[in-house]
Image: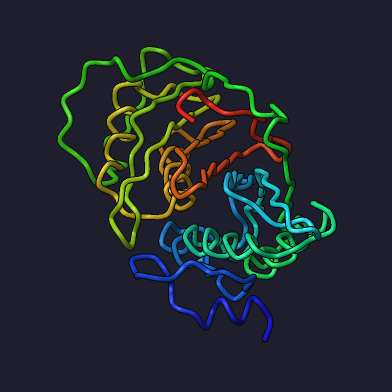
Amino acid sequence: MSSEHAGKNRHNPLGQAVEYACVYDPGLLFPIPRGDTRAGLGLTASLPFTGCDVWNAWEVSWLEPGGKPRVARARLQLPVASPNLVESKSLKLYLNGFNQERFEHPDDVAAVIARDLSAAAGARVAVELVAPDAGDLPLQAPPGQCLDDIALVVREYQAAPELLLLDQRRGTVEESVHSHLLRSLCPVTGQPDWGTLAVSYAGPAIDHAALLGYIISFRQHQDYHEHCVERMFVDIHRLCTPDRLTIEARYLRRGGLDINPFRSSEADAAPAHGRWYRQ
């Protein structure tokens, strides 16, 4: 049985008591179709954005042939066009199965992970193993102005696109803004997922207070990280029909994984390599 089929035949491990795997098992990976949520947003096969989901897996370990452990961070990049995302707990369980497996070289580990994740996602997943002392993720400020000190009365804590407003006084602008107040909930367990959100666009000016209220409205919204960012892209794009729009979320690490969805109307846009301050 292929790893893709094995994953589809298993139950989602979220919200269930499961034993940590002690052996390598690609069948632990649990794919989740992107299309179901996208259809609810009115999206078709021709997506209004490009992008990727960048994952950092901080708890990757295996054994050398002589039995000595090695550790690394895995940088995973799932293309936005992949039919599936991979549920994060299943990925953690899968990666834990490498702990007692022996490999000749780190490249062999990366190749196996890339093969299995690509099968689960339905598209090529790029995998890079990074040594602990590489220092390749410098801390960075999110782009643009922080909105978090805007005085605001908040009453909505479920995703509320009707809160978004244009700022007619400012006309057409090109700007980047960010907020550290993003919180959404796991759709299965209800556990909170904390993050920083950045919006960069060119077009009719968005009212900053309204945008902050909209971001906060996800506080009790239950969905996967990737779906939240795509919902935001669609809502903001419908409001201001910008010439350019990029939305990026950097979620805090949970279970040894941080997930960073990036969506842009620019075909050649890519997320900056680094960590934002809260990560």
Residue 264, picture quadrant? top right
Q: Where does the image place residue 233, in percent across and percent down from the top left?
A: 48, 42
- Can residue 34 be seen here? no
- Determine whether 45 is above or below 267 in the image: below
Q: Residue at x 73, y 46 (%)?
A: 129
- Give the residue at x 62% y 73%: 25
Name the image quarter holding residue 214: top left
In the depicted structure, whether residue 8 falls above or below residue 263: below
Residue 260 drawn at (x, y percent): 54, 41
- The image shows residue 144 at horizontal and vertical percentages of 50, 17
Q: How is the image coloured?
A: rainbow
Residue 23 horizontal side relative to residue 208, left or right? right
Is 256 rendered above or below residue 103?
Answer: above
Q: Nearer the viewer, residue 229 or 28?
A: 28
| Residue positioned most to the bottom | 1
Residue 234 seen from this side: yes
Q: Residue drawn 29% across and 34% down?
A: 216
